[in-house]
Image: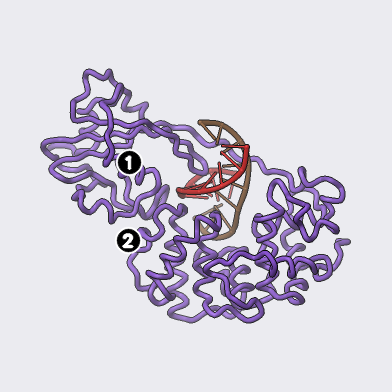
Chain colours: A purple, B brown, C red
Amino acid sequence: MPWPASADLLALLAPWFERVKRDLPWRAQGLDAPHPDPYAVLVSELMLQQTQVATVIPYFTRWMDQFPDAQALAEADEDAIHKAWEGLGYYRRARFLKAAAASVAAEGWPGDLEGLAGLPGLGPYTAAAVGSIAFQWPVPALDGNAFRVLARLLLIEGDPKAQAADLRAWLAPALATHGPSRMTQALMELGAMVCGPTPHCAACPLSGRCGAHLEQRTADIPPVAKRAVPKASALWLVAVEAQGRLLLHPPVAKGLLAGLWRWPTLNVTEFPPQAADQSPASLRAWPGWTQVYTHRREAVNPLHLCLDTDFEAAEGLRWVPMSELHALPLGKRDQRLRDLLATPGQAPLEAPEAAALIRACAAPSA
DNA sequence: GTCCCGGACA
DNA sequence: TGTCCGGGAC
């Protein structure tokens, strides 16, 4: 590649970062020594996967309070870590983090990049981020921000991720020259604060040598990748109450919302709405909403059915005392129904037939 | 509301 | 390649 030397091309990035850097709870004071708490770096990087800084900050603070080191996390039980992760999304990151902490507590920190990449939940990006930020290894960490910055700077046509290996090799000397932790964080900070999808080139320390800026191509470099269209579905999200208890699914090991408790759901096509006058007075409803996941869009219709007598729960469902509800880890969708239960609802205009709903939640009678 | 964004793993 | 979530910009 005819790319200019990275240490030279990125020389203005380091002083820019020292000037503008945010004071984040996981950042070390000095950026020239190894980080005093590699575990804090590990926690922050797992939380920052797919998640923005402002969202992570309160979770990180509470987490470090509750699980102050790898040993403490390794010994924590899974319900506690899911409760601490509740609302952050991508819940298996919490389980990976616990497993990685267990490895560190038992065998110590890996001594090289391959070792870090072997820890659960650490891919090429996160391993390099921890290596450079925690241990000052000159290993470039390329996340979505960094790829966008480098694609524009070097005027790379097409998907910059296709040149990941070349970019890492090119970038390594800049880390060695200007400091691995400083350069890794500076590159991502630039991508987050200045060189976003819509860049603010006037504020950029590299604009004078940026290929895309000089060619006025920042709008089309890098090209935007197409996303698969999410599948649509519609469901009833149901809180069934009887004798001070509520019916929930205990956590499952894999799949959507793994590790979390969930309300029972009924597919609207299998349980079509009936006319309002057939609904029992004990049925409440609230306005629905659209729940979006990576690959799926759910039209969610929340319901509360309150019964005088309970019944034997179907396989995979459990009666939970209402007083224990607040302690269970729930995803955002299910938190929302939990919170609605404390608010006034309305008799639904349309709802599934109550008897069918109960049959779906009850064990088949002998 | 609609659209857009993002690492790891099987 | 598809599966895992939630938030921010508009």
The residue lying at 25 percent from left, 31 percent from top is: A284
The residue lying at 65 percent from left, 77 percent from top is: A136
> Would residue A339 be found to the left or right of residue A38 on screen?
left
Q: Position of residue A43 (x, y in %)?
A: 49, 67
Which chain is disc 1 placed on? A
Q: Position of residue A8 (x, y in %)?
A: 84, 69
> Would residue A312 be found to the left or right of residue C8 on screen?
left
Which chain is disc 2 placed on? A
Amino acid carrying mark 2 in the image? Asp
Considering the numbered disc 2 on the image, is that residue within a helix, a strand or a loop? Answer: helix
The numbered dot on residue A79 is 2
> Would residue A131 be found to the left or right of residue A195 on screen?
left
Amino acid carrying mark 1 in the image? Leu
Q: CA distance from mark 1 to mark 2?
A: 20 Å
Instruction: Quadrant for residue A193, please give it.
Output: bottom right
Task: Tell which residue pokes out farthest to the right in this image.
Answer: A2
Disc 1 crowd rating (10 Å Cα; few below 14, some 14-19, many 20+) is many
The numbered dot on residue A337 is 1
Q: Nearer the viewer, residue A327 or A19?
A: A19
> Would residue A131 be found to the left or right of residue A68 on screen?
right
Q: Position of residue A241 (x, y in %)?
A: 19, 40
For marks 1 and 2 on the same chain, the one whose residue lies earlier in the sequence: 2
Q: Position of residue A132 (x, y in %)?
A: 64, 73
Check the image and report above or below for A62 versus A346.
below
Q: Quadrant of the N terminus of chain A?
A: bottom right
The residue lying at 23 percent from left, 28 percent from top is: A356
Disc 2 crowd rating (10 Å Cα; few below 14, some 14-19, many 20+) is some
Considering the numbered disc 1 on the image, is that residue within a helix, a strand or a loop? Answer: helix
Q: Quadrant of the C terminus of chain A?
A: top left
Check the image and report above or below for A250 versus A356.
below
